[in-house]
Image (cartoon, rainbow, N blue to C red):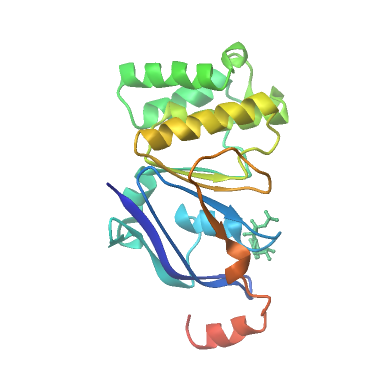
Protein backbone atom coordinates (compact mmCIF):
# COMPACT_ATOMS: atom_id res chain seq x y z
CA UNK A 1 0.00 0.00 0.00
CA UNK A 2 1.58 3.27 -1.17
CA UNK A 3 0.94 6.62 0.48
CA UNK A 4 1.17 10.17 -0.89
CA UNK A 5 1.02 13.20 1.37
CA UNK A 6 1.72 16.92 1.54
CA UNK A 7 2.84 18.58 4.74
CA UNK A 8 2.49 22.30 5.44
CA UNK A 9 2.77 23.28 1.80
CA UNK A 10 3.13 26.96 0.99
CA UNK A 11 2.70 28.26 -2.56
CA UNK A 12 3.90 31.67 -3.71
CA UNK A 13 3.43 32.69 -7.35
CA UNK A 14 4.99 35.90 -8.51
CA UNK A 15 4.99 37.94 -5.32
CA UNK A 16 1.67 36.58 -4.17
CA UNK A 17 0.94 34.06 -1.44
CA UNK A 18 -1.52 31.63 -3.04
CA UNK A 19 -2.02 29.14 -0.21
CA UNK A 20 -0.27 28.24 3.01
CA UNK A 21 0.02 25.35 5.46
CA UNK A 22 -1.88 23.02 3.16
CA UNK A 23 -1.92 19.34 4.09
CA UNK A 24 -3.25 16.28 2.33
CA UNK A 25 -2.84 12.53 2.69
CA UNK A 26 -3.98 9.68 0.51
CA UNK A 27 -3.19 6.06 -0.17
CA UNK A 28 -3.46 3.43 -2.90
CA UNK A 29 -6.97 3.35 -4.31
CA UNK A 30 -7.72 6.92 -3.21
CA UNK A 31 -9.11 9.86 -5.13
CA UNK A 32 -8.45 13.40 -3.93
CA UNK A 33 -10.66 16.01 -5.59
CA UNK A 34 -9.47 19.61 -5.46
CA UNK A 35 -12.15 22.27 -5.42
CA UNK A 36 -12.02 26.00 -4.76
CA UNK A 37 -12.59 29.39 -6.30
CA UNK A 38 -10.78 30.63 -9.43
CA UNK A 39 -7.22 31.40 -8.44
CA UNK A 40 -7.35 29.40 -5.17
CA UNK A 41 -4.34 27.38 -6.32
CA UNK A 42 -5.73 24.04 -7.56
CA UNK A 43 -3.58 24.01 -10.71
CA UNK A 44 -0.59 25.22 -8.71
CA UNK A 45 -1.00 22.37 -6.23
CA UNK A 46 -1.26 19.81 -9.04
CA UNK A 47 1.87 21.25 -10.66
CA UNK A 48 3.64 21.00 -7.31
CA UNK A 49 2.56 17.36 -6.99
CA UNK A 50 3.96 16.78 -10.49
CA UNK A 51 7.29 18.36 -9.61
CA UNK A 52 6.73 21.23 -12.06
CA UNK A 53 6.51 23.90 -9.38
CA UNK A 54 8.50 24.25 -6.17
CA UNK A 55 6.76 24.69 -2.85
CA UNK A 56 7.98 27.82 -1.05
CA UNK A 57 8.04 25.58 2.01
CA UNK A 58 6.70 22.24 3.17
CA UNK A 59 7.25 18.74 1.83
CA UNK A 60 5.57 16.15 -0.29
CA UNK A 61 6.04 12.54 0.75
CA UNK A 62 5.68 9.25 -1.09
CA UNK A 63 5.77 6.29 1.30
CA UNK A 64 7.09 8.74 3.93
CA UNK A 65 10.09 9.65 1.72
CA UNK A 66 10.47 13.30 0.70
CA UNK A 67 9.79 13.30 -3.05
CA UNK A 68 12.13 16.22 -3.80
CA UNK A 69 15.03 13.97 -2.70
CA UNK A 70 14.55 12.02 -5.92
CA UNK A 71 12.39 13.94 -8.41
CA UNK A 72 13.26 11.61 -11.31
CA UNK A 73 11.84 8.66 -9.40
CA UNK A 74 8.73 10.67 -8.52
CA UNK A 75 8.14 11.73 -12.16
CA UNK A 76 8.40 8.07 -13.19
CA UNK A 77 5.44 7.23 -11.01
CA UNK A 78 3.03 9.89 -12.25
CA UNK A 79 1.04 11.20 -15.16
CA UNK A 80 0.18 14.87 -15.20
CA UNK A 81 -2.53 16.02 -17.60
CA UNK A 82 -2.71 19.80 -17.46
CA UNK A 83 -4.50 22.53 -19.38
CA UNK A 84 -1.99 22.48 -22.19
CA UNK A 85 -2.33 19.51 -24.47
CA UNK A 86 0.72 17.31 -24.68
CA UNK A 87 -0.44 16.16 -28.11
CA UNK A 88 2.19 17.05 -30.70
CA UNK A 89 0.47 18.91 -33.57
CA UNK A 90 2.54 17.39 -36.38
CA UNK A 91 2.26 13.79 -35.18
CA UNK A 92 -0.81 11.65 -35.81
CA UNK A 93 -2.87 10.31 -32.91
CA UNK A 94 -1.21 6.92 -33.45
CA UNK A 95 2.30 8.41 -33.36
CA UNK A 96 1.48 10.49 -30.31
CA UNK A 97 0.06 7.56 -28.35
CA UNK A 98 2.73 5.09 -29.42
CA UNK A 99 5.34 7.51 -28.16
CA UNK A 100 3.70 7.46 -24.72
CA UNK A 101 3.03 3.73 -24.83
CA UNK A 102 6.69 3.01 -25.58
CA UNK A 103 8.01 5.13 -22.74
CA UNK A 104 7.55 2.72 -19.88
CA UNK A 105 6.79 -0.64 -21.47
CA UNK A 106 8.34 -3.28 -23.68
CA UNK A 107 7.10 -3.57 -27.29
CA UNK A 108 4.27 -6.09 -26.79
CA UNK A 109 2.96 -4.42 -23.65
CA UNK A 110 3.18 -1.03 -25.39
CA UNK A 111 1.10 -2.32 -28.32
CA UNK A 112 -1.56 -3.71 -25.95
CA UNK A 113 -1.66 -0.46 -23.96
CA UNK A 114 -1.91 1.56 -27.18
CA UNK A 115 -4.92 -0.50 -28.34
CA UNK A 116 -6.58 -0.26 -24.94
CA UNK A 117 -6.14 3.55 -24.93
CA UNK A 118 -7.73 3.83 -28.41
CA UNK A 119 -10.69 1.66 -27.38
CA UNK A 120 -11.37 3.26 -24.03
CA UNK A 121 -11.40 6.81 -25.34
CA UNK A 122 -13.02 5.87 -28.69
CA UNK A 123 -10.36 7.48 -30.83
CA UNK A 124 -9.57 4.50 -33.10
CA UNK A 125 -11.07 6.35 -36.08
CA UNK A 126 -8.62 9.23 -35.53
CA UNK A 127 -5.34 7.32 -35.62
CA UNK A 128 -4.18 8.88 -38.90
CA UNK A 129 -5.19 12.42 -37.99
CA UNK A 130 -2.39 14.86 -37.06
CA UNK A 131 -2.82 16.47 -33.64
CA UNK A 132 -3.35 19.92 -35.16
CA UNK A 133 -6.58 18.81 -36.89
CA UNK A 134 -8.29 17.43 -33.77
CA UNK A 135 -11.25 19.23 -32.23
CA UNK A 136 -10.88 20.47 -28.64
CA UNK A 137 -12.73 17.45 -27.25
CA UNK A 138 -10.86 14.96 -29.48
CA UNK A 139 -7.57 16.51 -28.41
CA UNK A 140 -8.59 16.20 -24.78
CA UNK A 141 -9.52 12.53 -25.27
CA UNK A 142 -6.21 11.81 -27.02
CA UNK A 143 -4.38 13.58 -24.23
CA UNK A 144 -6.24 11.60 -21.55
CA UNK A 145 -5.56 8.39 -23.47
CA UNK A 146 -1.92 8.83 -22.41
CA UNK A 147 -2.85 7.69 -18.90
CA UNK A 148 -3.88 4.32 -20.36
CA UNK A 149 -1.13 4.10 -22.99
CA UNK A 150 1.56 4.45 -20.36
CA UNK A 151 0.85 3.02 -16.92
CA UNK A 152 1.69 4.88 -13.75
CA UNK A 153 0.32 4.69 -10.20
CA UNK A 154 -0.41 8.40 -9.70
CA UNK A 155 -2.67 10.39 -12.03
CA UNK A 156 -2.75 14.16 -11.66
CA UNK A 157 -5.60 15.56 -13.76
CA UNK A 158 -6.24 19.28 -14.03
CA UNK A 159 -9.90 19.88 -14.93
CA UNK A 160 -10.00 16.67 -16.99
CA UNK A 161 -13.64 17.08 -18.09
CA UNK A 162 -12.98 20.35 -19.95
CA UNK A 163 -14.27 20.03 -23.54
CA UNK A 164 -15.45 16.44 -23.01
CA UNK A 165 -18.94 15.34 -24.02
CA UNK A 166 -21.12 13.38 -21.57
CA UNK A 167 -20.15 10.00 -22.97
CA UNK A 168 -16.43 10.77 -22.64
CA UNK A 169 -16.91 12.02 -19.07
CA UNK A 170 -18.58 8.71 -18.22
CA UNK A 171 -15.64 6.82 -19.79
CA UNK A 172 -13.20 8.90 -17.78
CA UNK A 173 -15.13 8.14 -14.58
CA UNK A 174 -15.00 4.42 -15.40
CA UNK A 175 -11.27 4.58 -16.17
CA UNK A 176 -10.63 6.36 -12.86
CA UNK A 177 -12.65 3.74 -10.99
CA UNK A 178 -10.77 0.83 -12.53
CA UNK A 179 -7.38 2.54 -11.96
CA UNK A 180 -8.30 2.92 -8.28
CA UNK A 181 -9.55 -0.67 -8.07
CA UNK A 182 -6.07 -1.72 -9.26
CA UNK A 183 -4.43 0.28 -6.47
CA UNK A 184 -3.81 3.52 -8.39
CA UNK A 185 -4.25 7.02 -6.98
CA UNK A 186 -5.93 10.00 -8.62
CA UNK A 187 -5.80 13.70 -7.81
CA UNK A 188 -8.04 15.87 -9.93
CA UNK A 189 -9.32 19.42 -9.95
CA UNK A 190 -12.79 20.23 -11.08
CA UNK A 191 -15.43 22.93 -11.23
CA UNK A 192 -18.13 20.42 -12.10
CA UNK A 193 -19.51 17.35 -10.38
CA UNK A 194 -18.02 14.08 -11.46
CA UNK A 195 -19.50 10.79 -10.43
CA UNK A 196 -16.67 9.43 -8.31
CA UNK A 197 -17.12 7.07 -5.36
CA UNK A 198 -15.47 7.59 -1.98
CA UNK A 199 -13.56 10.68 -3.00
CA UNK A 200 -11.77 12.89 -0.53
CA UNK A 201 -12.55 16.56 -1.16
CA UNK A 202 -9.87 19.18 -0.56
CA UNK A 203 -11.14 22.74 -0.70
CA UNK A 204 -8.00 24.68 -1.59
CA UNK A 205 -9.83 27.96 -0.87
CA UNK A 206 -9.65 27.09 2.83
CA UNK A 207 -5.87 27.46 2.68
CA UNK A 208 -5.77 30.33 0.26
CA UNK A 209 -4.52 33.71 1.23
CA UNK A 210 -6.92 36.49 0.64
CA UNK A 211 -4.03 37.90 2.62
CA UNK A 212 -1.74 38.82 -0.27
CA UNK A 213 0.17 41.22 1.93
CA UNK A 214 1.50 38.25 3.92
CA UNK A 215 3.66 37.05 1.06
CA UNK A 216 6.21 39.78 1.53
CA UNK A 217 6.68 38.89 5.18
CA UNK A 218 6.83 35.16 4.38
CA UNK A 219 9.50 35.87 1.78
CA UNK A 220 11.34 38.02 4.30
CA UNK A 221 11.28 35.05 6.68
CA UNK A 222 12.95 32.98 3.97
CA UNK A 223 9.91 30.77 3.29
N1 LIG B 1 2.99 31.69 -13.94
C1 LIG B 1 2.42 32.41 -12.95
N2 LIG B 1 3.05 33.48 -12.45
C2 LIG B 1 2.50 34.22 -11.45
N3 LIG B 1 1.31 33.93 -10.90
C3 LIG B 1 0.64 32.88 -11.38
C4 LIG B 1 1.15 32.07 -12.42
N4 LIG B 1 0.27 31.09 -12.68
C5 LIG B 1 -0.75 31.28 -11.83
N5 LIG B 1 -0.53 32.35 -11.05
C6 LIG B 1 -1.41 32.86 -9.99
O1 LIG B 1 -1.49 31.88 -8.98
C7 LIG B 1 -2.80 31.88 -8.42
C8 LIG B 1 -3.33 30.44 -8.44
O2 LIG B 1 -3.56 30.07 -9.79
P1 LIG B 1 -4.07 28.60 -10.16
O3 LIG B 1 -4.10 28.52 -11.64
O4 LIG B 1 -3.26 27.61 -9.41
O5 LIG B 1 -5.56 28.64 -9.55
P2 LIG B 1 -6.78 27.65 -9.81
O6 LIG B 1 -7.41 27.38 -8.47
O7 LIG B 1 -6.33 26.46 -10.57
O8 LIG B 1 -7.71 28.57 -10.69
P3 LIG B 1 -8.87 28.22 -11.78
O9 LIG B 1 -10.02 27.64 -11.01
O10 LIG B 1 -9.20 29.56 -12.34
O11 LIG B 1 -8.28 27.28 -12.79
C9 LIG B 1 -3.63 32.86 -9.23
O12 LIG B 1 -3.72 34.08 -8.49
C10 LIG B 1 -2.83 33.07 -10.49
O13 LIG B 1 -2.98 34.38 -10.98
Q: Residue at x 63, y 66 (%)?
A: 205
Q: Is residue 64 above or below residue 132?
A: below
Q: Return the residue nearer the eye: 167 or 121.
A: 167
Q: Is residue 212 above or below residue 65?
A: below
Q: Is residue 122 visible?
A: yes
Q: Is residue 141 visible?
A: no
Task: Residue 174 in the image: state x and y as whole percent.
Answer: 51, 29
Q: Residue at x 57, y 13 (%)?
A: 124
Q: Return the residue nearer the eye: 39 or 95.
A: 39
- Using residue 191 as the reference point, say whether residue 148 is left or right of it: left
Task: Residue 54 in the image: state x and y as whole percent.
Answer: 48, 64
Residue located farthest toward the front when viewing the structure as drawn: 198
Q: Residue at x 62, y 15 (%)?
A: 126
Q: Quadrant of residue 77?
A: top left
Q: Is residue 62 above or below residue 97?
A: below
Residue located farthest toward the top when viewing the structure as drawn: 125
Task: Residue 128 in the image: state x and y as whole percent.
Answer: 60, 13
Task: Residue 86 in the image: state x and y as whole percent.
Answer: 57, 37
Q: Residue at x 30, y 62 (%)?
A: 69
* Count of numbered labels shown in the rendering: 0
Q: Quarter containing ligand 1?
A: bottom right
Q: Is residue 74 above or below residue 142?
A: below
- Using residue 175 as the reference point, say whether residue 165 is left or right of it: right
Amino acid sequence: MATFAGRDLVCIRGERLVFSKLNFAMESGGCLTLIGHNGAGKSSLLRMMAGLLHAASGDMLWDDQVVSDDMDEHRERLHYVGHHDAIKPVLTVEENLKFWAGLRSDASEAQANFKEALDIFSIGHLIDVPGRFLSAGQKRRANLARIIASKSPLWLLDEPTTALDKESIKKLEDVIESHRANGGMVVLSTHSDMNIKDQQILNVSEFSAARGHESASLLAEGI
